[in-house]
Image (tube, rainbow, N blue to C red):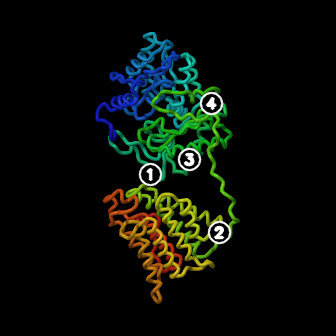
Amino acid sequence: MSHFLPETDAVLTAARGLALAHAGTIEVNGSPLYLRARDADPARTVALVSGGGSGHEPLHTGLLGRGGLDAVCPGEVFASPHNRQIYEASAAAAKSGGVLHIVKNYTGDVINFQIAAERLRHDGIPVATVLIDDDLATDSAESATGRRGTAATVVVEKLLGAAADRGATLEELAELGRRIVGHSRSIAVAARAQTSPTTLKPAFELDEGTLDYGVGIHGERGTRTIARPATGDLVRRMTDDLLDALPEGPDEVLALVNGLGATTELELNAIAVLLNDELTARGLRPVLVVPGTFTAALDMAGFSLTLTRLEEGWAELWTAPTRTPLVLPRPSLTPESPAAPVPTPASTPAAAPREGGDRALLDRYALTVTQVRDNLTKLDQLVGDGDFGDNLAGGVRRAVKLADETGLDGTAALAEAFLNDVGGTSGPLFGLLFQHLATASPADGGAPTVAALAEAAAAGHAAIHRVGGAVPGDCTLVDALAPAAESLAAARDADAPEAPLTEAAQAAIRGALATASLRPRRGRASYVGDHALGVPDPGALAVALLFMALADIHEPATAPRLPAPGHITVI
């Protein structure tokens, strides 16, 4: 099956695990397999039964219990449950008012639920069906099967669960379910396919910088592959498509931000704010904005957005209490807008940016970092947590913006940005280095002297050592900074150095590359031990890039050069 699932009876074993974690509220029937809630609300007269292929957890089993479903029939991974499962689960859960089947619109699910319904009617058990077809990616007049059923299933099951606990009849629940489905649309995207349970490899490949638009929850390819836009632009596009397809209705909406299995809570929460802002800007009122993983596609890296226009009373059904494994977010019905950034005091009117070497250094370093960001990230993924490239590039972008807005010198802007705004370990350490290098910049914007740079580099090195304790050989940024500072000091003491900045840059490069042979003794790379051998330290490379940029500005004829951006491997 998958990486850590049992080789046999994986779905049954997982069902038993859920019941073990929720003893007393969930029971498992092994043959045929279904799960049943043991704690129904006494006011309920109709049983709610759902199910589908496994791999979508926490759907449907996460909504099993009071305020949710009475029984769930899990099929094998991405496969419909058998009609016998559905029939026996429904017969066991049936109440005086009958059974309501909640079915996602997939051929296997529809056929097996229909057969089970026929068998139940033959036994004299009243049964009705709500068919969920919310996926606008498959909304085509040329398709006989119609839209797929996806994450709106969560909305339907939650609202119907609350209504059933209020004593709604079979006819009332069926009509309510159909109205909720009619008011709901979803769209999903993915940047990486799910892992195939048989090959243990991605089910399909996506080129770097692309994503699939309109993927399905069974790992189906999207309706088209697009160049990957910025996340805000992607959410805007998805919102536009949803609203174009969503039938007219009330302006109050429920917005579900659903992870497809490998998308983090951090990402989903951020996307929820972007979606909230897009809806508000269009004059809609997102009464409920709900981020989380509710309908997965195994471990697909992607997310879906679902919008449901809310009729009167539906929001209260969402916030009604439950006793289910999945604890759904219950936001206020009148939420305040997400916290806006705290305004900062007005800045001093921006001075005209200086055009001396210091600003040129910032611009050159910014260009270089942009070119190698992804490579630094890949190196950091091998020895750390993979955030170094983004942190460095983000800090440099802040510095450029700061210099543009306030007229700060380039290295002064770098110092302020990295000391104040860049987190982690390396950000503030680079801030200390930039702070000292800024002292070498002449007031007239001219080129810094070798003596001033030597003193500044030595002071930066000393400050970083005082704070972090690193020395050459520890496999940190100091392994590039120390030889560069020593080279500048030697050039300062020489009578007529020919290219002191070039020599300092070359010393930094040698020091950075030499870290590949070191076993890290400090920093996050020290946690991976020998796994770091062969990988140059990203922080040391970033220091080398800084001195290369410095040499390129002031000694362009001799300065070390970066290869073309498409051919950068290390530096």
- The spot of residue 185 in percent (x, y) is 56, 34
Q: Nearer the viewer, mark 2 or mark 1?
A: 2
- The spot of residue 520 in percent (x, y) is 35, 63
Asked if disc 3 and disc 1 are in contact, CB closer than 8 Å, the reply is no
Q: Answer few, some or many: residues within 10 Å of disc 1's Cα (few below 14, many 20 plus, some between 14 and 19).
A: few
- C-alpha distance separating marks 2 and 3: 34 Å
Which residue lies under the disc numbered 4?
Answer: 310
| N-term mark: 3 or 1 | 1
Q: Nearer the viewer, mark 4 or mark 3?
A: 4
Judge by depth and name the residue closer to the eye, 282 or 357: 357
Q: Residue at x 39, y 18 (%)?
A: 88
Which residue lies under the disc numbered 1?
Answer: 207
Specify the amino acid type for callout 1.
Asp
Q: Nearer the viewer, mark 2 or mark 3?
A: 2
Residue lying farthest left? 7
| N-term mark: 4 or 3 | 3
Res 262 quadrant in image: top left
Which residue lies under the disc numbered 3?
Answer: 234
- C-alpha distance separating marks 4 and 3: 24 Å
Specify the amino acid type for callout 4.
Leu
| N-term mark: 4 or 1 | 1
Judge by depth and name the residue closer to the eye, 274 or 44: 44
| N-term mark: 4 or 2 | 4
Q: Residue at x 33, y 32 (%)?
A: 10
Which residue lies under the disc numbered 2?
Answer: 407
